[in-house]
Amino acid sequence: MCNTKPFWAKKNEEKWLQLKFNIDFLKNTKIKYGELHCEYCGKKDLVIYDWCEKINHYDVATVDHFYPKSKYREYKRDEKNFIVSCYSCNSQKEDKIWPKEAIKFPLNEEKLNNLIEVK
């Protein structure tokens, strides 16, 4: 557990707040569902790393913004827009919008059905 803010947080407070928000989302999701897996490819046993830990790209849990925060700033902290993703899928998706059908392993079917609809 990291007790201090990273040095870069002073220069980029917004990035720091988003990172903390994402980590909290992942922790709460793991508590709620008992595990984390990639909702795109199904990769199991994803790990939540704190900001100060060296991550393993193979098993890190990431938050994918289904509608990319670069294009839809209003949804950057809307958990209805969050998809648990492995590093590989999140990197491949980048800031594209994939079809809802790409979410093959949803943690929550109801959430998938209520995914934000952007026109």
Image (cartoon, helix red, strand yellow):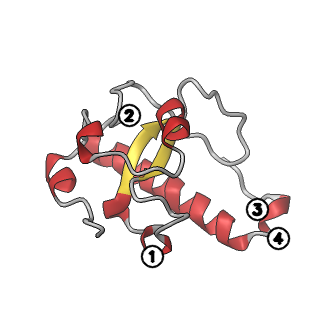
Q: CA distance from mark 3 to mark 2?
A: 28 Å
* Kind of residue indicated by mark 2: Cys
Q: Nearer the viewer, mark 1 or mark 3?
A: 1
Say which label, 4 or 3, has the lower sequence index.
3
Q: Nearer the viewer, mark 4 or mark 1?
A: 1
Residue bearing mark 2 = 38
Q: CA distance from mark 1 to mark 2?
A: 24 Å
Say which label, 1 or 2, has the lower sequence index.
2
* Kind of residue indicated by mark 1: Glu
User: What residue lies at 66% left-to-right and 71% top-to-bottom?
Assistant: 14
Q: CA distance from mark 4 to mark 3?
A: 11 Å
Q: Position of 20 compared to 52: left or right? A: left
* Kind of residue indicated by mark 4: Lys
Say which label, 3 or 2, has the lower sequence index.
3
Residue bearing mark 3 = 5
* Kind of residue indicated by mark 3: Lys
Say which label, 2 or 4, has the lower sequence index.
4
Crowd band around label 3 with a 10 angstrom C-alpha radius: few (<14), some (14–19), many (20+): few
Which numbered marker is on residue 111? none
Residue bearing mark 4 = 11
User: What residue lies at 29% left-to-right and 46% top-to-bottom?
Assistant: 99
User: What residue lies at 82% left-to-right and 70% top-to-bottom?
Assistant: 11
Q: In what quadrant of the picture does the C terminus appear?
A: bottom left
Indicate the secondary structure of the residue bearing disc 2: loop
Q: Where 33 sits versus 2, above or below? A: above
Say which label, 4 or 1, has the lower sequence index.
4
Q: Circles 1 and 3: CB distance less than 8 Å?
A: no
Q: Quadrant of residue 111?
A: bottom left
Residue bearing mark 1 = 74
